[in-house]
Amino acid sequence: MARGIDGLESELLFRRGGPLEQQRPIDYLAAREPVYARLLELLQDAMRGEASTRLAAAWSEREFHSSYERPLMLLAGLRYDALSDIGAHPLHAALAQTPPDPATATADALAAALSAARTRFWSAVRERAVQTNETARAVAWLWPLSLLASAGEQRAVVLIDLGASAGLNLIADALPAVWSDADGAPVPVAPRLEVVLRIGFDLAPVDVSDEDAACWLRACVWPSDAARLARLDQAIACFRASSTQPNAPQLVACGLSDVPARLDELPREPLIVCVQSIVRDYLPAAERERYEREMRAFLQRRPRAALWLELELDPAWKTSPTASVALTARFAAAGGAIRELVLARTTAHPQQLLVDDDAVTMLQSALVVPPRRT
């Protein structure tokens, strides 16, 4: 855990090239987004001047729990200000133009973007959090619901998004399927179990009906990633349209460690499917421990009636660029024992799943409940 700007300089440093296992998350980001690589270089010097004093004041009460959270926060804040001030921002061509122009990211432009006059930037880094709402991560629930349906499961589903932000993953079934397996074949996400209730829990849910909030989500998408930005805009439009539907997603302000108690209030007949995606590293250690303990206890109170799906970075696989993220399924078997299965491995922005067929078969055989005879 880091507080304020303590240790920030070491997070801004990065090495070009070198073995993947020696790189930090920020190295990966630098390799993928040239304009961000340039800004990170410049920020190392900028954070030794007046901007450092202002940032220390802005973050004096904030704690950060992953090595990539603060660099991403700074970059997203700059991009948000640029997107909100089209044409006039000193880093407009670098951060708000399509495609971005890294050559325009100069020391003078960055200094102007970090000046005290850029109040929108300073408010953002003080008050907001990085929230990408990467809907490609919805494969974490779409695919398992298809697997269960193909194995004969017939129960309806209550879908729970843990750390939902704006809740866009709750409506990802309205978006195009973009996933394939190791052989390039489409990953089946339909037909799947019917979702009758959609609830997202987040400490500070984002309301995408507010255009400024939607702008922040766009700012969290890297400048050159036009495909992700287009998918985000499509998801925002779908979420806004869904608000008038009977099965509209519900967003609830709630800390994750308090969610399991809320889940006990749900009816026992549908299958409760909880999903989280790249949430774990943002939680304080004590809260994370309590949350995971209470989630396991909830599963044991609902044997074969609740499924906890987790798409999270796997430190044991950090050397693999295509399998650094594990899709894990947890549930309580009929006797109450917790089962944990890694169904597939992928990346933080899933496109290809490296499927474990044995784990898939075990999930289907252990969790599917035969329909009642009448």
Image: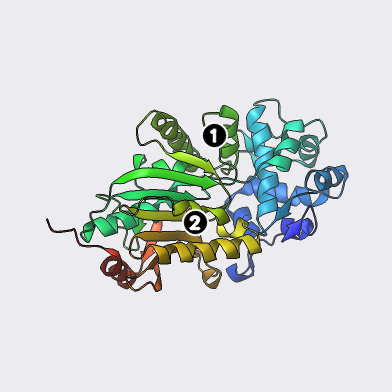
Q: Would you say residue 322 is visible in this rendering?
A: no
Residue 260, numbered circle = 2
The residue carrying pointer 2 sits among few (fewer than 14), some (14 to 19) or many (20 or more) residues within 10 Å by Cα, namely some
Which tag, 2 or 1, sits closer to the chain's start?
1
The residue carrying pointer 1 sits among few (fewer than 14), some (14 to 19) or many (20 or more) residues within 10 Å by Cα, namely some
Q: Which residue is mark 1?
A: 207
Question: Where does the image place residue 243, in percent across and percent down from the top left?
Answer: 42, 31
Q: Quadrant of the C terminus?
A: bottom left
Query: Which residue type does callout 1 highlight?
Result: Asp
> Tag 2, which secondary structure?
helix
Query: Which residue type does callout 2 highlight?
Result: Pro
> Tag 1, which secondary structure?
loop
Q: How many marks?
A: 2
Q: CA distance from mark 2 to mark 1?
A: 23 Å
Q: Nearer the viewer, residue 162 or 142?
A: 162
Question: Where does the image place residue 335, in percent across and percent down from the top left?
Answer: 34, 74
Q: Quadrant of residue 1?
A: bottom right
Question: Which residue is rendered at x = 72% and y = 32% of the image?
Answer: 120
Q: Quadrant of residue 361?
A: bottom left
Horizontal side of residue 140 vs 64, given as left or right? left
Question: Which residue is rendered at x = 47% and y = 59% of the image?
Answer: 311
Tag nearer the camera, 2 or 1? 2
Horizontal side of residue 258 vs 334, given as left or right? right
Question: Where does the image place residue 186, in percent across and percent down from the top left?
Answer: 30, 54
Residue 46, numbered circle = none
